[in-house]
Amino acid sequence: MRFYRSHILVCNATPCVLKGSRAVQAALTEEIERNGLEQEIKVVETGCLGLSECGPIIVVYPEGTIYANLTPQDASEIVREHLLKGKIVERLLYRAPQAARMPSVALPESPVLARQQRIVLRNVGLIDPTSIEEYVASNGYEALGKAFSMSPEQVIDEIKRSNLRGRGGAAFPTGIKWEAARNASGEPKTVICNADEGEPGNFKDRIIMEGDPHSVVEAMVIAGYAVGAHKGYIYVRGEYKQAINKLNKAVTDAKSKGLLGEDILGSGFGFDIEVFRGAGAYVCGEETALIESLEGRRGESMVKPPYPPTHGLWGAPTVINNVETLANVPQIILNGSDWYNSIGTERSKGTKVLTPCGDVLQPGAIEVPFGITMREVLYEIAGGTKSGKEIKAVLVGGPSGVCVGRESLDRRFAYEDLSPGAGALIVIDEDKCIVDLIHNCLEFFVHESCGQCVPCREGTKRMLDIADRWVSGEGKPEEVRLMQELAKNLAVSSRCGLGQFAGTAFVTSYNLFEDEYHAHLAEHECPTNICAMRNGRRMSNG
Amino acid sequence: MKNRETTVKSAPRVNVANIKAIVAKHNALRGNLLPVLHEVQAEYGYLPKEALATIATEMNIPLSEVYGTATFYSLFSTSPLGRHVIRLCNSAPCHIEGSRAILQAIKEELDLEPGETTEDGQFSLQLTSCLGLCGVAPVIMVDDDVYGNLTPEMIPEILAKYRQEEG
């Protein structure tokens, strides 16, 4: 490997690309060559640093200087001043929006990163995700070697003792899932990575796959070894083109290095991975629907039990884990379950990637230990609201999650307190209408219901019909009870989570904002003037 | 005035041998139905009826099931689409950040409702669920390109790029 005196990391995650990071990268490369520095300075493409609002972003190492909001015209100044003269270009420094007076010079000290504890995002933004060498250089595939020195039972035991739970929202203990699949009879066993991230407001899995795809590949081989599977699928939603490309590259590179295929690292254990592209169906994030889809069918969920660890893909034992769950695995194997248990709260171990979005100043993916309060996340890390007004409500986990208000700001994210679901924090400020937001969530569920079970297909539709009237000034106060009944029936009689949780946001928001609902239903007024402005015109999912 | 079902571009004739080759490439196992549909859709811009029939025969799956699968997923279309497909995210984060105004701007620019294709066959407009780009909401995708942090004023310029492409 060549030695470079400086590295320039260019964030090439989708949001930065949108803002022109490729042109900035080209300009930097050109300037470096013009100054004859190409032997000394390397330009590297990386994943998202979680500062998407300020893209295009670069980080200059070894100093860790972050420059933000760049244009191609800034390249010559950075090369001339910083790389040739060693002077920081003050005017281009990244400034945390919440502390605009104080430029953050070094990456670890930026307010967004200082409060984080990055385990699954540890490499994201710091290594070139398309380079297996860089992953290996940051201890990549070391956990795999360590796992091979243990028995499969010991690996499962370590994961069980770490108390790692599923990060896709359901929080099922990962070790117990693995053990069930290991003990189940039937062949061939399969490991599936659920990368069908579709819950609105969630994009953590995309950030991991785009920024550190090998962490998922390594974890799947470990999972395969533990449960006795030799085949893995990464089921990625069809819209995530960049993630699919990065994963395919990672799988190809791992194969060429003997980290996938037969007799991995001389262990005698063989494992292969196929990246499978979904085709646009939210319900396929539900594990039984995902399996149907992998089998070439409509993505309709199945009655459970039996569960996938005993009856999964093609009827054989199957482990399905979320991307973030898997990305934790190599670090747990490497550092031990005691280390993992030292992070978080008594009953929620480790970290969680959260994605504050909506009306927050600094949306993005952040990784924090369990136990952090919502106030710390939304005000100290995400910088409060864009408008500077008070936070009115947060959909924790997304439309399938719960709606909470300001009174919950001091609650802690933990399974025993406020469960973060998959991690979305959809924030609205005081100027937004809660009825309008819930109406939008119901549109989503109607559009995404797979339609096979009646409570969900009909229930979501009826709820939307009622909400349609509420946002166009035709609601009646007595419809609240009907809506609550529908939500309750959906919760108890739907086949899968889509229907079961479709009414939760309404029920929880009604408890908090009864007055606002009352204004819509009894007075036919929208206090924030959002519904009134619609004049009965609505977006339909035509 | 706008087309929903009719052929809006000179739909390529389905080449049966070509479809057979695609199936053979993935091999005819049932689990490869989605990869096959993806590739046929990429080739023809949609999934023509004749193609679905060939896939059904070659893969030994009832046509009803092939059709049922094809119509289940939002990225597949069984009717021809415009040369460029605009997908507008209207999930909660984009909604909060103003996707409705973006939709209005596109509707006005193209005289088009969601689900329709322009008369000249240039653009189809579809609403989509969350694209996972909530950090830069509101967002649209045109074909494979993503545009974020949108304001209604940006729409004419973005669409003009795709119009010009046709020269």
Image (cartoon, helix red, strand yellow):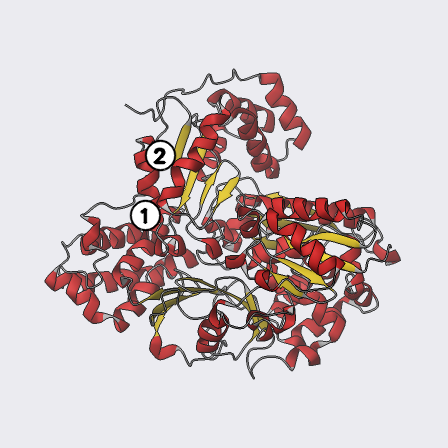
Question: Would residue A77 appear left or right of A450 to someone viewing this image?
Answer: right
Q: Residue furthest bottom?
A: A346
Amino acid carrying mark 2 in the image: Gly
Q: Is residue A316 visible?
A: no
Q: What residue sits right under mark 2 in the picture?
A: B115
- Looking at marks 1 and 2 on the same chain, the residue that comes earlier in the sequence is marked by 1
Q: Is residue A24 above or below residue A62?
A: above
Above or below, B143 against B133 in this view is above
Instruction: Please count the marks in the image.
Output: 2
Q: Which residue is denoted by mark 1 in the rendering?
A: B100
Instruction: Using the numbered discs, state the Cα–Cα distance from disc 1 to disc 2 in whole angstroms.
Output: 16 Å
- Identify the chain of the residue marked 2, using the numbered disc in the image: B
Question: For numbered disc 2, what is the local secondary structure?
Answer: loop
Report the residue at 19% width, 70% height from top. Answer: A515
Q: Where's residue B47, x and y in %? A: 49, 27
Measured from the top left, where is residue A303 in percent x and y?
A: 46, 55
